[in-house]
Image (spheres, rainbow, N blue to C red):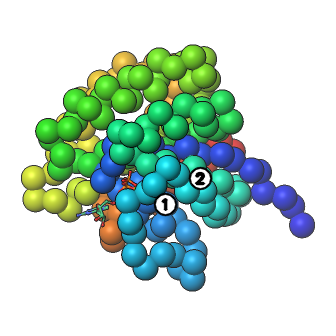
Amino acid sequence: GLRKKEVNVLCLGLDNSGKTTIINQLKPANVQAQEIVPTIGFNIEKFKSSSLSFTVFDMSGQSRYRNLWEHYYKESHAIIFVIDSGDKLRMVVAKEELDTLLNHDDIRIKKIPVLFFANKMDLRDAMSSVKVSQMLSLENIKDKPWHICASNAIKGEGLQEGLDWLQEQIA
Ligand code: GTP
Ligand code: MG
């Protein structure tokens, strides 16, 4: 049969933003983890969509592991950047890490799509995706296609919309 196009996706964002929970939801139900624990270093996860075969590098967001992120920039075809919409205090830290990412030599020149999840939209004091995009100054990203979706990774809401957008950009 037809081979699906293989794409490497790098999943980034601060610790506790919900990266692993999101990636777990995108996997087939029979291989989903029942319990999510903070990621140590990174995990590699694979899943398929209708047209693509994804290899996701689910990185730890803990500060001590963030120096691992850059080793995977060169080989990535897309980035998923996850934000905890309820974590107002650390939004500036998330912005710093995003700016460092976008200014890195291996990313700056690449026109790869960046999908943002404004995650934890279920929290009572969650910021809207519009507010999150303002806080992160996403309108300044001119050289890459980007998109932001509000999501609730626990219920799986908003994830498919994001993945559909990513597929369109890559296919
Ligand atoms: P690191 O691996 O440490 O970088 O964290 P992570 O970004 O992978 O976060 P993880 O998926 O481990 O989720 C952290 C916590 O947030 C867990 O307790 C999740 O259950 C919770 N969580 C994830 N997504 C949501 C969401 O949409 N809403 C709520 N309320 N909690 C969420
Ligand atoms: Mg994780």
Q: Quadrant of residue 148?
A: top left
Whether residues under marks 1 and 2 lie with C-beta atoms below 8 angstroms apart, the answer is yes
Residue beneath disc 1: 23
Q: Residue furthest front?
A: 64
Q: Is residue 106 above or below residue 78?
A: above
Residue 165 can be seen in this image: no
Residue farthest toward the bottom in the current orientation of the protein: 30
User: Mark 1 or mark 2: which comes first in sequence?
Assistant: 1
Q: Is residue 105 left or right of residue 94?
A: right
Residue drawn at (44%, 41%), measured in percent from left and top?
65
Asked where in the image residue 76 lies, by quadrant, the reply is top right
Which of 84 and 148 lies nearest the eye of the viewer? 84
Placement of the N terminus among the 4 image quadrants? bottom right
Residue 56 badge: 2
| Residue at far right of view | 1
Q: Secondary structure at mark 1?
A: helix
Indicate the amino acid at tag 2: Val
Q: Give left or right: position of 112 versus 147.
A: right
Image-based side of 119 in relation to 68, left or right: left
